[in-house]
Structures are given as structure tokens and as C-alpha cells.
Amino acid sequence: MSLLLVIPNLAACAQGGAENGGLDNFTFGTSATMSTTVGNDDGDTMGEESTDTAEESSEDDTTDAGTETTTEGSSDGAEDCGNGIIDDGEDCDGTNLGGANCVGLGFDSGTLACDGSCLFDVSACESIEEFCGDGIINGTEECDGAELGGATCEAQGFDGGSMACDANCILDSSGCTTNPSDTIIDFEDGMIPPGVQSGGAQNWGLSQTLPYEGVYGAESGDISDSQGSWVQVTANFPAGGSVSFYRYVSSESGWDYGQFFIDGAMQDEWSGTVPWGQVSYNVTAGAHTLRWVYDKDGSLSSGSDLMRIDYIVLTGGTI
């Protein structure tokens, strides 16, 4: 063990005392002090050991502080990819996908995985190429081939028929049908309508002479004695209905007649001078043949010798 003795420089003290009035003003730690070191067996000095100890203590404190700083920094970054927990900045972690799958990411099928950086791996997800004609209703398509998405004519407001899909994957309702409340035959297109037939000695035709309404009406053919001229139409009445029309007759009264038949059964007849007037007849459900006839006897003619009809209305029927 070494001892450090500090012995005042008496001469200096004396001098200082003389100058300053004695030892009362003596100050330790000034340049006037002198140190004496007592060494140990190893020759080390107490001063050196004290200095070494102070330096070692300082180094230890510095090392501990550095270690503490390093440890705290490691604690702040404890959210590690691979811990099975989805931390901030991670899509996933290991098998923990957070409930995500390929479909949820916009693919059609496949298996979602998690890569080593805790990001989604979509390499095993699959997308099916979508196009009109693939049999699958995609995007803005209303249908695709035979796939109509449950669409029917009835659902589109029609009474029946067959819904289809066109080449552009748009619903095609051209095959749908509607049962109109009224079918009107008014001859105003200047021709005998499709489905209307005529026969006898002379066919019926259109005339602009004295129509009931508009420009055209239908009138019987120019026939001779003992001849007839007829016009007919077959109409379908799904739930029954009626037929009405306006008729005009100018004939030899009591001998030449204008007549109306349903399925071959005469409903009414008119002879002589009969001005325009409307008549109506009920029909049962089903298909019915409606026929108008102008029939002459064996001799003589009177008036215009014809029958005219106009503005036929089939209520609940179609042709």
C-alpha cells in the first residue's frame, strides 16, 4: 500500500506568511505544495494506481453506457418478420395471412402464400381470361351464350316467349311475346295485312271510296249473280275476348247479303242499304276463323252491289 503525504513548503509558507500576514491565508492545492510518495514492494506508486483506477472506472462506465444504449435499441425493433404476428408494414407472417386469399386480392382462384419478407406471394394465384363467348357472365355482360343469369321474358315485362343472348353478350328479347289487349286492323298501310286471306269469285280489295275512317277500307270483289266474295282471318284468343268492326252494305234488299261468320257459323247478315255502323261479338278462348262474305242471288242487282268493312278490333286476340 502506498501513502501520499503532502508537506507544505515551509519556506514558501514563511515567505507567504510574511507577505500575507501569517499562515491564516494558506491555500491548499497551490503550486506551493509538494508531494512525497511512499512506494511499495513492487515499485508502484499510489498516485499511479489511483490514476489507473479512475481511468478503468471511466472506461467501465463508458462501456456499460454503450451496452445499455445498444440493448435499448434492440428492444425497440422487436417486431420481427417471422414471429408469426402481422406487425406494422407486413402483409402477412408465415402461415398467418390475416384471412386474405387470392380471390380477395382480385384473382379468380389459387393459393396465396407469404414470402420471406412478410409480403403476399401471389405467384400461385390464377386469373381466368374473361371475354364475351366464354359462357361466363363477366363485368358488364348481361349474358353469355346460354347463360342468361336467370333472365326471362316474363321478368322483362313480356307475356311469354324465349329470351336469348346476342353476340355482344346483351339480352335479346326479340323472341319474347306480348298479348296485346287489342289488335287493330284498319288497312291504313294501303295493303291487306299478313294473315288476312281472300277468295271466292273475286278477292276482296282495298278502296278509298267511302272508308269509315282514314284513307282505306276493305270491300268485296266485283261479282256476278249467284257468286260470292269472302275475306277471313284466323285469330288466337288466349283467354277469350271479342271482335268488333264497322260494316257497310249496299245490295238488292232481301236477296243479296253481307254476312259475318265465326268458325263457319253465321253470326249476322245485312241486306239493302245499311250505312256504316259498328257491331261486336264475343269469342271463347282459342283460335277462331273470322269470315266476311258478300253473297248474291241468281238475278238482279241494286245499289253499289257490295259490302265494305273497316277498323276491325280483336280484343284479347292476335293474328
Image (cartoon, rainbow, N blue to C red):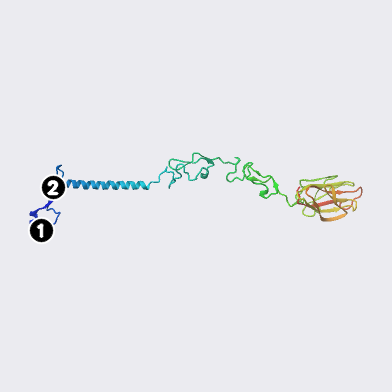
Residue sitting farthest toward the bottom: 21
- 246 vs 149, nearest the viewer: 149
Q: Secondary structure at mark 1?
A: helix
- Residue 53 visible in the displayed image: yes
- Residue 176 visible in the displayed image: no
- 129 vs 20, nearest the viewer: 20
Q: Position of residue 255 (x, y in %)?
A: 90, 51
Residue name at image x 13 percent, y 47 percent? 37
Residue 279 lies left or right of residue 146; in this view the side is: right
Q: Position of residue 151 (x, y in %)?
A: 64, 46
* Quadrant in the rendering for residue 135: top right
Q: Which mark is residue 83?
A: none
* Amino acid tagged 2: Thr
- 303 vs 309, nearest the viewer: 309
Residue under label 2, please give it. 37
Quick one: label 2, few (<14), some, or many (20+) residues within 10 Å? some
Q: Position of residue 101 (x, y in %)?
A: 51, 43
Q: Give the total number of marks visible in the rendering.
A: 2
Residue name at image x 23 percent, y 46 percent? 56
Q: Secondary structure at mark 2?
A: strand
* Amino acid tagged 1: Leu
Q: In terms of sequence position, does the residue under pointer 2 or pointer 1 come before the other?
A: 1
Residue 267 lies left or right of residue 316; in this view the side is: right
Residue sitting farthest toward the top: 124
Residue 13 lies left or right of residue 126; in this view the side is: left
Residue 220 lies left or right of residue 119; in this view the side is: right
CA gap between label 2 and label 1 equals 25 Å
- 29 vs 50, nearest the viewer: 50
Residue under label 1, please give it. 23
Residue name at image x 12 percent, y 59 percent? 25
Which one is in front in this view, the residue at disc 2 or the one at disc 1? 2
Q: Position of residue 49 (x, y in %)?
A: 18, 46
